[in-house]
Image: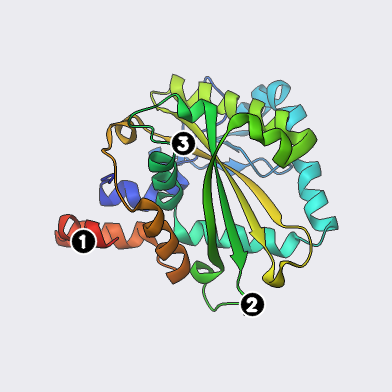
Amino acid sequence: MPKYSAESVTHKITEHSCKLPACSNSKLQGKVMRLCAQCKSVHYCSTDCQRADWPNHKQLCKRLAAARDTEESEGNGDLAEDFAAWQAAMGPLLLTWICTYGLTVYRHPENIRTKFIFLSLKARAERPFTPLKMFEYGSITVLDMSALDGLLGGSAQDIKDHISESDKQVKAKGKAGTALVIVSVKRPGGSGPPFVRVVPVVLRMEELAQDEFMGWENMAKDIINEGRSIKHRVAKLEKSGQLEDAIVRM
């Protein structure tokens, strides 16, 4: 199972590297990072960096912004907000673990580029009091990248290009690569089209060295259904020196 310092567990979700390839700034370094106001999918550390990257980003930016408009028109705007709140509260460690073990990157690092994770969730019938319990677990499936065409239709190539570009950028900064998670959220009773979110997950070199962890999928299921925040739990256990004893129960 991956091991991280309490500081990295707490801040990993907000690392947010500047998208401009030539810039190495990130929030983890104490820099102020801001989302692109149109697509709300990439971060920049300054207006100058955003302007410099605009020729490369503009086409994808317009498509991502249009996809968000479609979400609103299909009545999925509330699920988009719920998912953003759930993802922020849950922290990045859940999807990192799912990618690390689901893609078996410790044995096949090439799977970061050739496969992706499909995570199915279901919105709870009654709105919970905390975003951590917003969804119930459905399933985790590992698919070949070619399956994106059937899932996402005409936007599949844009997503492939986006992930490929991100993969190159993070590798240039010494990281292992960018894995892809497609999250599908169904409404209670299955009414209406599911909400679909594309989530890039940046993996680090140390995550490629993790041994096989049996039961990782059941762990993910329990964490989602019970609404446990991994980042805070791991940081607390590590600070108290209890992390090694607790790992098998997480």
**Which numbered disc, 3 or 1, marks the residue closer to the eye?**
1
Residue 91 is situated, as x and y percent measured from the top left of the image, at 44, 55
Q: Is residue 62 visible?
A: no
Q: Which of marks 3 and 2 precedes in the sequence?
A: 2
Q: Amino acid at mark 3?
A: Val
Q: Is residue 160 above or below residue 241?
A: above
The CA span between labels 2 and 1 is: 32 Å
Alpha-carbon span between mark 3 and mark 1: 26 Å
Q: Is residue 165 above or below residue 67?
A: above
* Residue placed under numbered mark 3 in the picture: 202
Helix, strand or loop under label 2: loop
For the C terminus, the image quarter is: bottom left
From the top left corner, tell me how far across and down residue 76 is, in percent.
75, 60
Q: CA distance from mark 2 to mark 3?
A: 32 Å
Q: Residues within 10 Å of mark 1 (few under 14, many from 20)?
A: few
Name which of mark 2 and mark 1 comes first in the sequence. 2
Residue located farthest toward the right when viewing the structure as drawn: 73
- Residue 100 visible, this orientation: yes
Residue ID at (52%, 21%): 168
Quadrant in the rendering for residue 39: top right
Secondary-structure class at tag 1: helix
Query: Do the residues under discs 2 and 3 have CB atoms within 8 angstroms?
Result: no
Q: Which residue is mark 2?
A: 125
The residue where tag 1 is placed is 246
Circle 1: residue type: Ala
Mark closer to the chain start, 3 or 1: 3
Residue 140 bears which disc, if any? none
Q: Amino acid at mark 2?
A: Ala
